[in-house]
Every structure is written in structure tokens, then in C-alpha cells.
Image (cartoon, coloured by chain):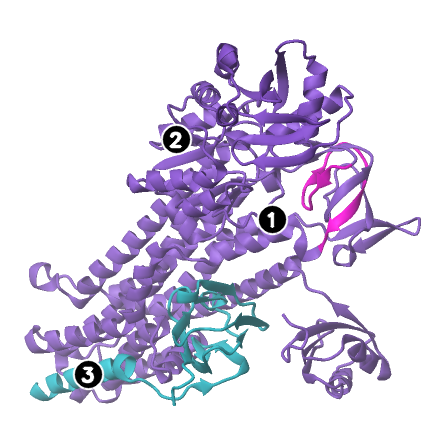
Amino acid sequence: MLVINILGFALISLIVWWFWLYKPRGGVVAKGTVPITVNNGVYTPAQVRVMAGEKVTLSFLRKDNSPCSSIVQFNNLEISEELPLNKTKEISLESLKPGTYPFSCQMQMYRGELIVEGKDDE
Amino acid sequence: MSSNNPNKETILLIEGAGCASCVGKIEGALSEVSGVKTASMNFAQRTVLVTGNANEDELLGAIGSVGYQASLVKQNDTELLDEKEKSEAAYYKRLMKEMTIALALGIPLMLYGLFIGEMTVTTNPERISWLVVGLLTLGIMYFSGRHFYIGAWKSFLNHSANMDTLIALGTGTAWIYSMVVVFAPDAVPLMARHVYFEATAMIIGLIDLGLALEIKARGRTSEAIKRLIGLQPKNARVLRDGEELDIPIEDVVLEDLLRIRPGEKIPVDGVVVEGNTSVDESMLTGEPMPVKKISGDEVVAGSINKSGSVIFKATRVGKDTALAQIIEMVKRAQNSKPSIGRLADVISGYFVPVVMIIAILSALAWLNFGPAPALAFAIVSATTVLIIACPCALGLATPMSVMVGVGKAAEAGVLIRNGEALQTASKISAMILDKTGTITEGSPKVTEIQVTGDYKEEEILSLAASLESGSEHPLALAIVESAQERGLVLSKVANFEAIAGHGVEGSIDSNSILFGNEKLMDERSVSIEHYIASAQRVASEAKTPMYLAINGELAAIISVSDPIKNDSVEAIKRLQANGIRVVMLTGDNRATAQAVAEKVGISEFFAEVLPEDKSIKVEELQAQGEIVGMTGDGINDAPALAQANVGFAIGTGTDVAIESADITLMRGSLHGLADAIAISKATLRNIKQNLFGAFIYNVAGVPFAAGVLYPFFGLLLSPVIAGAAMAFSSLTVVSNANRLRLFKASDH
């Protein structure tokens, strides 16, 4: 029984680590137009890095039929756009301040983030 | 979209492509055109989708070079909508098929378990038959539930979790446990040798059903926008080189002359140049009465020509028409989220991993403290917890209601800029109404001229009109119009100066003329005391007295009256009945303001307010703790509209581009204001019901699924019931939002 309990709590710790604590480095460092595919419950890439002050265009291509995926919203930029199926929809963002701008579907199930890095980072 | 966009999409319609082998030829020819990234042909539809920044003529040329004809397909809102509906219909069909197959296995299995036999594994023949059922279930998981597992896996790799994760884990746990029982019954205590294949099949079927019904219900939430898009006719009849041509509306250009017959929809915005008619603009403005149109009047796309045949000149086409802008604005607003939804967003962001943890904790609790067969209880409770939790309902609660509410408002001629404006409008406690043009018609008329000494009415009016001819103030327009009606000749004005909030001055034929209100006379020490009584009488009749002084001596009082809109009194009553403190604001003099206020039943008003001070009055009310709505025509009260918690602009039917307003009323009536507030209140109530329902559902459902009631009542929820509850909880949210469509704003 002890083993089972330990296994259970280990599993919980793994969940906490995998979904919350683990901060992936990387993502796509991008300039100009970044294609993002919306399919199977995820944005690919789900993390896009850009430099502050540069214009970036996110070009969403939705291949997923589920109605949930049909809207992408950037809550702290007050952007909300409908994504047509199998067509690209471009969202242009200009001169963003450094910071993290999450984007998601209306139900917060599809999630991604746009990370704007300051000039003197890295 | 910029023209040098490397991902530009062009759709070409190919003619004469009769065989599948043409596909390769056409795609090959297109991919050689510079700038083309991909070219893929849909043979069934005879269309090619080209991506990349290529010249359209070169694309057409390339297709011509391999022997086919092609034309460009321009996509408009109508086509996009058709396409969306088609793809949704296809998705619905697929889900229904998947649901049928899953339930075809799930229901008999469940009935067997309930009424016929035990779903346990004890003997070898039982093992074999359950193995067959297990494999059938695996088939269902692949055929009907594949999308859940793929989605769950992809988002897992992405360090995120969603509905798919919960469904995949729940159904997966049930199936794997059952297969363990089948293959290695000895590894499981005797009493726990139960299989749950029916749960897996039923859950997948029920959730597919829920999704399918949700798609149908979602379709209804966008009915308002569909109706607006449907107002655009496909074709227009233009007069070019003396000929009448029927052309697609995309091809109409500015300055084109178009002919409209009775009963037809007006295709683009324009100005009537010939003929007269009446036009039904109700779909756009909510104004039920047809509007007369004569030469020089504006007509707007989407309105319906009732009686006559007219020719009009296109002034705005394509994306610039009022209708196109309304559609764009409504779409945007429908997709935006008011802050009331933010908490739900935060919660749903953490929701799924939390539920996974609860599922594990619940399983551990059963294993540690539960009665025999503890393992079976642990598996059932974990599965049920995973399946019952529904972050979707929480996430959908706000957007679905906003979608319906904003659409509903648009139908009543009320354009709401975004979700936040909708939310704040529901909380308005005080409403400031500008007098001129808001409560009144805004088209004043000269009603009386009282002269002093030997002056003649005509002479006075001519002087006043000469002075005012450069001004755009509504009162000035009344003076000038009146002079024109009497055929008076206007004189040249020297040293003209407009004194904001006071009046104007200038000199005519070396006489210095002052024309304005009492304040102006006071400031310039023009004595008006003998005429105060008569001015007061004028003001008490809700007319505005204006003084004209020649060389420092009062020469006349011109009274101007601006009729009150016939439904202002009713509409103001509606606002007051809803507990809103209604305040009138005007630059007009105190006595006139008081008379107008009394006529419309407003007890509180600010008079003689300079245009730049209007926003200060808004601030004053805000300082008293009021949530202030400000209504004006959007022209000279932009700062006040911006200062207010919610700025309402009263449009003239087609002026959508009133940027400073949070809410635009398309028709002039103040009823629009009461409608807007009623709709926003109803929408917020609906959102709260949804949020409350979704929240309580999850807060109560998850512990129930984990088995908190078992120690007291011996109750443990079946995973199948959890699946049904989950599938229908999001459907309930969408349906509740749809209930808003039945809301009648005019009853409130």
C-alpha cells in the first residue's frame, strides 16, 4: 500500500512539474511572418519569440474542425479573431513591449504564447 | 493584408478541366510562376488554392498556357459564411456517425450489465467473450474517439492539457483496467474483477453527441450576424455607357450609377441622383418606418427599396459600406470578452491538471480507506472524476452569451463596440442626455422675432443670418435657413469671431453686431433688462431666445425652437423605470433647459454648459459614485463620451464610424438607449447564470464523482452518467445563451 501511495504522490508531482513548473526554453525565434498551425488541440508552434519593437505577423492556419478552435484570442492585447477552416488568417502585431502575451481559444484549451524579448536580453 | 504577403491565398476557378490528370498539369504550371509557394487543386470543386505572393495575371496566364481557362474567385462574407456552414455541417455529420457507432456497442453492453448478467470475469469462456468486447471497444476508441486521443497526446507534448486529456485519460483508464482484468484476472482481487468497456464506449458516444448538438446550438448563436450578411445582395445593376449590366457587387466601383427597382435590396452605399422612393432601413437601424428618399439623399447597402425606381451613384463600395462596417464591428464585438469572463479563463487554465490530481487523490483515498473491492472503487471514482469535470462549460459561459447579446443588440439597431462596453452598460446608474439632437430633433426653427425700436424683422434676420452663415451650430443653421426661406440677401461680414458657448460677433456695413445668448450680452454690457420678461416667456415655452445687438444696443430677440422627438418622453420614462438617474445637459440657457426638462420629465439638468465643460459634468457624477452613461451626437461631445463609463452616440442611421462611442444607436430614438441597457442587463444576467451553473456543476460534480457521498448514503456515480452530465453541461450553457434570442428589449 505504501508503494502505491508513493507512486500516487509521485504521479501528482509529475503532473505539477510537467504542466506548471516546466518552462520550456526555445520555442520558435521568429521575424516577419510566423505560420502557426491549429490542429489536434494545439497550436504549433505554441511558443513564438520575437524581439521587442519588431513587427510580427502571426499567420494562423486552422485545420481543426472543432468549433472551439475557431477563435483565437490574445487577452491582454484585446484581440480576438475568427480563424476560418483550412485558410490562413493573419494577425499583425506591431511594436509590442517586452513581455509574454498568451493566446488561446475561447475555452482556454488551446494555448500558446508570444514572448517579446527586450533588445538587451540574450 | 499587405500585397507583399508571402502567404497570400488566391483561389482560382478552372474551366474545362475534365480529367483527374489535369490536376498535375495545372498544379505544375502554377508552381512555376514566381512567388508561388504551393498550388493545390480541388478537383471536385474545380478550384485551385494558390499560396504565395504571385501576380494574379501570371497565374491566369500559366493556366492558359496548359490549355485551360481560369478565373479568380473573390471571397466575400457570404461565401465565407457558406463555407463555414458547410464545414460545420460536415463535422456534425461525422460526429453523429461516430456517436451512433459508439452507442451501438455501448447501449447493449450497458443494458446487459444492468438487467442480464454480471460484467465480471470469472471463467475462461467469460474471458474470451470479454476479450472480444474489449477489442470491439478498442475499435470504437479508434473510430469514434480517435480525435480525443490525438488531441490529448499532442497537448501533453506541449505541456498543456484540455478536455481531450480528461476524456482520453478517463476512457483510457477504464479500458486498460478492464483489459488487465481480462488478461490477468489473478492480478486483481476477486471482487474487483469487473470490466468497464460499456463506460468507455458510452462516454465516447455521449461526448460526440454533446459536441454535435453543441455545434448546432452554436450555429444559432450567430444568427444575427448571418442575417446582417444576408442583407447583402449578390448582384447590382449598373448603368455603364448607356447600358444596364448585371454585375457581382464586388465589381461595383465608386461613382458607378446603379438602378434599383421596387422590392430590391440596395447593393452599395450611394446618393440618389434620379427618382424618388421610400426605403426600409429597419434591418440596419431598427427604425420600423420606411424612410423617404429623394434626389441628393443617401441610401445604404442592405436596405430594401419599397416603392419607386431610382438611380443612385455609388459612394462607398465593398468593405467601406456602412453595412460591411457594421458586420465587421458586430463580429469583432461578438468575439471580444468582457472582464466578467476573466476569472473563468484563469480557472480553466489550471483546471485540467487539478482535476487529474483530484482523480489520483480520490483513487488513493479509496485504496487506503475504501471497502472491498477497493481497487474497483478506486478505478471507478478516478474515471468518473476525470469524465465529469468540464472546463468547457466554464470557458463557454461568457463568449456564448456575448455572441447572442451583441447580435441581439445589432438587430435592434444598437452597435456595441466590445464585451467590456456591454458589461459596463448593464451597470449604468446615471445617464446624461445631451439636449440638442438627442432629446430634441436637433433641427431647430425660428419661431418668433421681437424687434425693438424701428427695426424690421427682415432686416434683423438678414443681419443675424449673415453673421451665422459661416457657423455650423444647429441654432445658426436655423437662422440661415429661415433667412433663405424668406429670400433674404445676406451681407458681407468683417472681423467675424465665434465665441464658444456664447455666440458670434462681427461687423456689417461698419455696424458692429453681436448675436448670442444672455451671457454674451452681459459680458459686453448690452442692457437687456427691459426684455427679460419676454425672453423668459419664450424660454418657458421651451424655445431658445437669442439676442441681437447693434452697436451695443439690443435690437431684437430671435426665438428658436427645437421640437422634442416624439418618443423622447416615453424612452426617458423607460430609463427612469429601470432606476436610472436621468440628467439633461445643454449649452442652452437655464429657462429653456428647464422648460424642456419639465416637458420630458427630467428633474435634474445642467444648463449653459460650455462644450468643453461637458466632460467635467460627467466627472462630477462619477465623483458621486455613479456609473455614468453619456449620450450625444458624437460630434462636439466626443470628450464627454470618452470620459463617461459608457459613451452612447446617437447616429443618423448610417454613421457607424463614430469612434469615440462605446455604443452607437443607429436610429435617432432614445428608445435605443433603453434597449441597449436592457439587452446588456439581460446578457450579463445570462452570463452570470452560465458561470454560476458551470461553476457549481464542477464544484459539486467532482466531489460527487470522487465518492464523498458514499460513506453517508452508499452512493457512487457511474462513469456513464458522468459522461452524459459532462456532454450536456456545455450544451446547457450554449442553449441558455440561445435563450437570450427570445429576449424582447422593448418590454423592459
Residue B537 seen anywhere in this rendered image of the structure: no
Query: Residue B635, percent across and down?
Result: 56, 42
Q: Image height check: is B461 above or below B647?
A: above
**How dense is the environment of label 1, judged by Cα within 10 Å: few (below 14), some, or many (20 and up)?**
many
Disc 2 marks a residue whose amino acid type is Val
- Residue ID at (51%, 68%): B94
Which residue is tagged 1? Answer: B228
User: First in sequence: mark 1 or mark 2?
Assistant: 1
User: For numbered disc 2, what is the local secondary structure?
Assistant: strand
**In this image, B134 relative to B487: left or right?**
left
**Quick check: is B326 in the magenta stretch?**
no
Residue B592 coordinates in the image, percent (x, y):
48, 20
Horizontally, residue B92 falls left or right of residue B739, namely right
The residue nearer to you, when weighing B388 against A39, is A39
Task: Identify whether B488 is placed above or below B729.
Answer: above
Q: Identify which residue is drawn at 68% across, 50% down.
A: B232
Q: Residue furthest right?
A: B242
* B611 and B328: which is toward the camera: B611
Chain letter, purple in picture: B
Q: Which residue is tagged 2?
A: B582
The chain ID associated with circle 3 is A
In the structure shown, which secondary structural element does the residue marked by tag 1 occupy?
Answer: helix
Left or right: residue B314 compared with residue B729: right
Where disc 3 sits, the SS reads helix
Q: Chain of mark 1?
A: B
